[in-house]
Image (cartoon, rainbow, N blue to C red):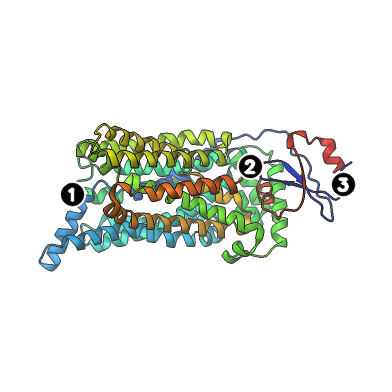
Amino acid sequence: MADDTEPLLYDRSGSISIREVDYAIVKEPKSATTPKGFTKQLILAIAACTLGSSFQFGYNLGVVNSPEVVMKSFYNESYHRKEGKYIEDSLLTLLWALTVAMYAVGGMIGGVSAGYWSNKFGRKGALLRNNVIAVIAAGLLGFSKMADSYEMLIAGRFVCGINAGINTGIVPLYLSEIAPIELRGFAGTFNQLAITIGIVISQVLGLDYILGTDELWPLVLALTLVPVIYQLCVLTFCCESPRYLMLTKHDEQAARKALIWFRDSDEINNEIEEMRSEAEEETLSKKFSVGDLIRTPELRTPFIISIVLQLSQQFSGVNAVVYYSTNLFTSAGLSSNNAEYATVGVSMVNVVMTLVSAFLMDRLGRRTLHLTGLGGMFIFTILLTVSRIFQPTYHWLSFVCISAVVLYIITFASGPGSIPWFIVAELFTQGPRTAAVSVAVLVNWLSNFVVGFVFPILQSSINEYSFVPFAVMLAGFWLFTYVMLPETKGKTVEEISALFLPKTPARSISIERLTQSDLINI
């Protein structure tokens, strides 16, 4: 018989560790019933959330790329009408850089406030209210040409960024809290999928023979209203997050109703019991601030993991590859038009591979896919750099360069594109979760801004070697992930949190070998 003072705790490998404490903790085995999985209600909520919010983020991220030339022309003409002279190239470049950068600045502000919004109004409630900001942004962007004001356009990008920052903080929370454990990764990946779809559609609509013309470019900016209308019409009729209702509002009856709606079944006792257990723990703990994430030992490690995974997404250089893919294709010998089509094609590859990764996420796990993605990006970044260096001498390397870009995007979409967004919600319990998500989103947007600001400087100073810093950082991120990131696939929040409890000398037994009699004896 095992010692009567040994509770069950999971180690990083997924085995159960037995360590000595002053009392025994024995949980009843989980019911053998199989969850319903994806119900019509769950699919509806995921679609309303991602196609309404995540799509907006992706759409506004890519919408200024294709019509850049005609929008710069508007800046020039507007300046001439006001000042009586045309704008200098240096000032035009600065104004355009400000237009692009203000989206990230707004995103940082929105990301920091996402935790407040989600706790005050709920996950669903915050997403619906955030659409007011989207409507204001669409008005500023859509009427900027009519008002002959590029200042309105820059302000619209800033407001649009605030909307995107709030969305990027709340959407992963909502998705992770409404999905059953075994489908949490699948649901979370749809956030990134909707982002990539938004990027592709904005690039296509912004082409010069569709809406990227002198007269129609304000329309392509204002079309961000379409997902707003869709979300208001659909998400309104979906339920609030059961975990929010149970753990934040302390309304078990409402949580039960929401869970029954999402599962299309009244067999929800296991999930209710898990939330009750988490609620009991929350009542014994204080309210969490950002400082507590650093000071508390069991929160510090997942907090560091969350931050580094956000950095691994942005400092992988993916935005530099996407933004400059047209230039890369042009230098490889494609015409300007064909280079634009190739860029759209690369974005479509991103969409397809993100969809594929959704089906792999809960089979292979987050850790495996993130390691595979970072490793592949490192290899293809090196390949891209080498092909660019020797391309003037060996012209056939231009095709290697194009292939490297495509393969780089494929490996990015396999894991690093989606995992950092939803992994934070998995690593933390309800108490510290919103604080951790807010900081993680801020770091993601800040690193996005840094890459966008620094890469042009790298490009002009070291040219073909401009991707080398990203390769070095990818190697570091791969090592960190290998050492620090546990697998969260198929684990409850309590089980994941137990992985980060202070370690003491322990002995482990395999989960597969732990029988019902073992539980009774323990």
Mark 2 and mark 1: Cα distance apart in space: 50 Å
Image coords of residue 33 (percent x, y): 71, 33
Instruction: Please provide percent x and percent y for residue 3.
Output: 87, 47
Q: Quadrant of residue 341?
A: top left
Task: Single out the mark in the foreground, 1 or 3.
Answer: 3
Residue 311 vs residue 231, the one in the foreground: 311
Give the residue at mark 1.
215
Residue sitting at 49 percent across and 59 percent down? 114
Judge depth for marks 2 and 1 and give the one in front: 1
Q: Can residue 249 be seen in this view?
A: no
Measured Cα–Cα span from mark 1 to mark 3: 78 Å
Read off the residue under disc 2: 260
**In 3D space, how far apart are the residues under numbered discs 2 and 3 (Cα atoms)?**
40 Å
Image quarter hosting the N terminus: top right
Residue 122 in which image quadrant: bottom right
Answer yes or no: do the residues labelled 1 and 3 have beta carbons within 8 Å?
A: no
Percent of width and height locating residue 453: 33, 58
| Residue indicated by mark 3 | 3
Compared with 386, 463 (above or below) is: below
Quadrant (top left, top right, bottom left, bottom right) of the C terminus: top right
Q: Tag 2's secondary structure?
A: helix
Instruction: Work out whether 521 lies above or below 75.
Output: above
- Count residues near mark 2 (Cα–Cα under 10 Å), then give few for <14, some for 14-19, many for 20+: some
Q: In this view, does 330 lie to the left or right of 347?
A: left
Q: Nearer the viewer, residue 109 or 450?
A: 450
